[in-house]
């Protein structure tokens, strides 16, 4: 995505958060939007077809109906789809939906971390991780856990703006960079 | 790629010894990358000029802070950066290694050695942006910086702490004058830093070899940002050179920095500004192009507490047009300029210094008394010669005095010519100018002027060494010494035989 589209997507997301019914705006709402956004990132070409001049009005309506009713998009977000379609900016929909979650969490002081580990983590360890991240960031944290064998051993926690890693992969990267720096 | 096995173990130990951090790092994510510039989202607390580290090993410097993203210029073009790559703050601005161990080394704009002589052992790391010394901290320029070029030392003398611009068309000898000045600093307690910006690698290699052959690398540092380097490196290189010079000055030493050339530096900065989408101004240069050079050159000067940084910026012009944008900026910043004229160069007058357009605003305050005394009337004589030359070209009949002035001027021009890589000490220069002033050259053929002067200097050095040494020690020529020199010159005239074979 280019810089201009990135800025535009953020503006749409902020505008939507400012104007949507605040009773509807909940954590589940934005998480659902972001989920749809993640899926739509893989279906960009499908969104681009919507704006092709050669498809008929009927076909366009059917596609929009599928998007609004069958993609899992919350009802209150369908107005966003209509607005983007009217502006000819459907390609920004995935980024806007993902940005909604990011901005909403920022507003309520919540940070979402993606925690990757080389092996499965038990409940007690998860609690320790969340306590550590909450203490270090000074905010309420929400963690998603996933496995990443490329770490070899260790863990990595990453949000939009904060990062922590202690893993064998990181050490090897640092060693490689140290050698690289010395020899070039 | 060479790796020393003993160092490899210590490198690994160093990299692997660090334990887990207790703090979270601020990161951003690469949105867009191309033309050595990255757009990064995140990094909300990053500062302007901060160095950031890319996960893939590259590094960059932050140049634009926008509401939603920051723009980062990359330091290395051989380490790839990909979209969605994580970028971390380092919390520090760009710094370069400084220290006495830098002497004799060739480094690039990031401080990495290019000469395969091992790692740089730095005393410290200094930021490249620094506040120029204030008015109160400075001392008036009073000590000369001998370039070894007779025409410059006699007519456009440079002092330690001065900024003197070298300006001319391409291939008029600007770099040659700068290199000869560096070569002449041997045993003068002046550390030299040559900054090459946007030059060809072959040219830089040739220059380094010349410095090595003449033993100049014993007191010099070369900072090279070649034409193939990222544009950020070409922007940083002059500031790196200036920072190294300031380190020498902070230790009470004298330093000379040659910036070759600031036209390429301005072009690099223009490229960066256009990539950052900053508004282009005159000739597409950004609005702060003057500040780019003024903040660099204002850092030169002599300090009350000791030490000096002398700057010799070089600027290339097109078609002898000194009224172009960048040259006029630099002329207004510096303490004088040495204009190298293409016409003079093509006529064989080398160094091709146009005496009428060249000036040193420090003037006689930075000249040794010996040369000042001997060159007192030289500028006037040359001005009269050039005026009369116009009349002579019309075929006008001139009176005897005018003809004498013409003849005198021709001999002065011939005397001021000098071969490449040939430098004179100030005593040699004073003796040569003495010959001109005392009319000993008037009866010689033009082709014999320089051999006569050079052989006279050798004659005095060999047979009247005490006179030579006295002038060297006192840096002045007394009336008594002038009488002695007259007698020596009369003696020499009788025995001078010019070898016309060469």
Image (spheres, coloured by chain):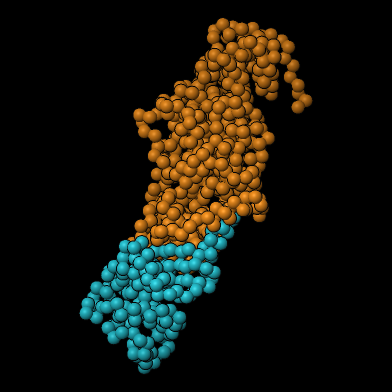
Chain colours: A cyan, B orange
Q: Is residue B333 above or below residue B366?
A: below
Q: Quadrant of residue B489?
A: top right
Q: Please state if B143 lies on the left or on the right of B201 as rendered.
A: left
List x then y, in percent, for residue B186: 60, 28
Q: Is residue B277 above or below residue B428?
A: below
List x then y, in percent, for residue B203: 63, 44
Q: Is residue B456 above or below residue A90?
A: above
State the residue in front, B450 or A78: A78
Q: Please state if B3 lies on the left or on the right of B124 as rendered.
A: right
Residue shown at 61% from the left, 20% from the top:
B428
List x then y, in percent, for residue B317: 52, 43
Residue shown at 53% from the left, 61% from the top:
A171
List x then y, in percent, for residue B151: 56, 26
Residue shown at 40% from the left, 75% from the top:
A123
Q: Quadrant of residue A45?
A: bottom left
Residue B263 appears anywhere in the view = no
Residue shown at 44% from the left, 58% from the top:
B21
State the residue in front, B428 or A35: A35
- Quadrant the N terminus of chain B occupies: bottom right
- List the single residue furthest toward the front: A124
- Quadrant the C terminus of chain B occupies: top right
State the residue in front, B81 or A12: B81
Q: Is residue A24 above or below residue B462?
A: below
Number of numbered callouts drawn: 0
Residue A153 appears anywhere in the view = yes
Q: Quadrant of residue A157?
A: bottom left
């Amino acid at each position: 995505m280019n810089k201009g589209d990135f800025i535009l997507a953020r503006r749409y997301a902020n505008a939507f958060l400012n104007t949507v019914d605040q009773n509807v705006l909940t954590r589940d709402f934005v998480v659902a939007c972001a989920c749809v956004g993640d899926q739509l990132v893989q279906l960009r070409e499908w969104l681009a077809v919507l704006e092709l001049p050669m498809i008929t009005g009927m076909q366009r309506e059917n596609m929009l109906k599928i998007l609004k009713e069958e993609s899992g998009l919350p009802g209150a977000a369908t107005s966003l789809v209509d607005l983007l379609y009217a502006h000819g900016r459907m390609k920004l929909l995935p980024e806007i939906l993902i940005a909604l979650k990011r901005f909403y969490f920022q507003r309520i002081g919540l940070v979402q971390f993606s925690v990757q580990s080389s092996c499965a983590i038990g409940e007690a360890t998860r609690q320790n991780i969340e306590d550590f991240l909450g203490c270090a960031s000074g905010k309420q944290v929400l963690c998603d856990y996933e496995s990443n064998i490329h770490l070899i051993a260790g863990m990595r926690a990453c949000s939009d703006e904060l990062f922590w890693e202690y893993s064998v992969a990181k050490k090897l990267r640092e060693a490689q960079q140290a050698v690289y720096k010395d020899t070039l | 790629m060479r790796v020393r096995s003993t160092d490899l173990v210590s490198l690994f130990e160093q990299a692997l010894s660090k334990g887990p951090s207790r703090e979270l790092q601020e990161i951003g994510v690469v949105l867009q990358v191309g033309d050595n510039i990255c757009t990064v989202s995140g990094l909300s607390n990053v500062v302007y000029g901060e160095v950031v580290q890319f996960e893939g090993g590259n590094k960059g410097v932050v140049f634009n802070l926008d509401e939603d993203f920051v723009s980062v210029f990359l330091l290395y073009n051989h380490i790839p950066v990909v979209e969605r790559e994580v970028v971390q703050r380092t919390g520090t601005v760009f710094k370069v290694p400084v220290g006495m161990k830098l002497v004799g080394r060739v480094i690039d704009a990031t401080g990495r050695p290019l000469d395969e002589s091992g790692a740089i052992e730095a005393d410290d790391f200094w930021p490249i942006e620094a506040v120029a010394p204030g008015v109160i901290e400075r001392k008036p320029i009073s000590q000369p910086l001998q370039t070894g070029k007779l025409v410059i030392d006699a007519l456009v003398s440079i002092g330690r702490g001065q900024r003197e611009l070298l300006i001319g068309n391409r291939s008029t000898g600007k770099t040659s004058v700068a290199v000869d000045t560096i070569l002449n600093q041997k045993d003068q307690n002046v550390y030299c830093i040559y900054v090459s910006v946007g030059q060809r690698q072959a040219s830089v290699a040739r220059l380094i070899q010349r410095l090595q052959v003449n033993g100049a690398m014993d007191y010099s540092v070369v900072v090279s940002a070649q034409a193939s380097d990222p544009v950020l490196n070409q922007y940083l290189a002059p500031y790196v050179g200036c920072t190294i010079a300031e380190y020498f000055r902070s230790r009470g030493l004298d330093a000379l920095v040659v910036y070759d050339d600031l036209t390429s530096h301005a072009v690099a900065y223009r490229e960066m500004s256009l990539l950052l989408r900053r508004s282009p101004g005159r000739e597409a240069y950004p609005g702060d192009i003057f500040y780019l050079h003024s903040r660099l050159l204002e850092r030169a000067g002599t300090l009350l507490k000791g030490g000096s940084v002398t700057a010799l910026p070089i600027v290339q012009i097109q078609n002898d047009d000194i009224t172009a944008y960048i040259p006029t900026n630099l002329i207004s910043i510096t303490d004088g300029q040495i204009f190298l004229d293409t016409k003079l160069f093509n006529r064989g007058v080398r160094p091709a210094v146009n005496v009428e357009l060249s000036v040193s605003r420090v003037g006689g305050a930075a000249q040794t008394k010996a040369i000042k005394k001997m060159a007192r009337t030289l500028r006037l004589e040359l001005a009269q010669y050039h005026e009369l030359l116009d009349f002579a070209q019309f075929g006008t009949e001139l009176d005897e005095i005018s003809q004498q002035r013409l003849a005198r001027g021709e001999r002065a021009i011939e005397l001021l010519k000098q071969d490449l890589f040939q430098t004179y000490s100030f005593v040699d220069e004073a003796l040569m100018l003495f010959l001109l002033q005392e009319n000993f050259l008037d009866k010689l053929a033009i082709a014999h002027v320089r051999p006569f002067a050079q052989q006279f200097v050798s004659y005095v050095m060999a047979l009247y060494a005490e006179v030579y040494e006295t002038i060297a020690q006192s840096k002045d020529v007394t009336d008594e010494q002038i009488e002695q020199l007259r007698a020596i010159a009369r003696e020499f005239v009788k025995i001078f035989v010019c070898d016309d074979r060469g």
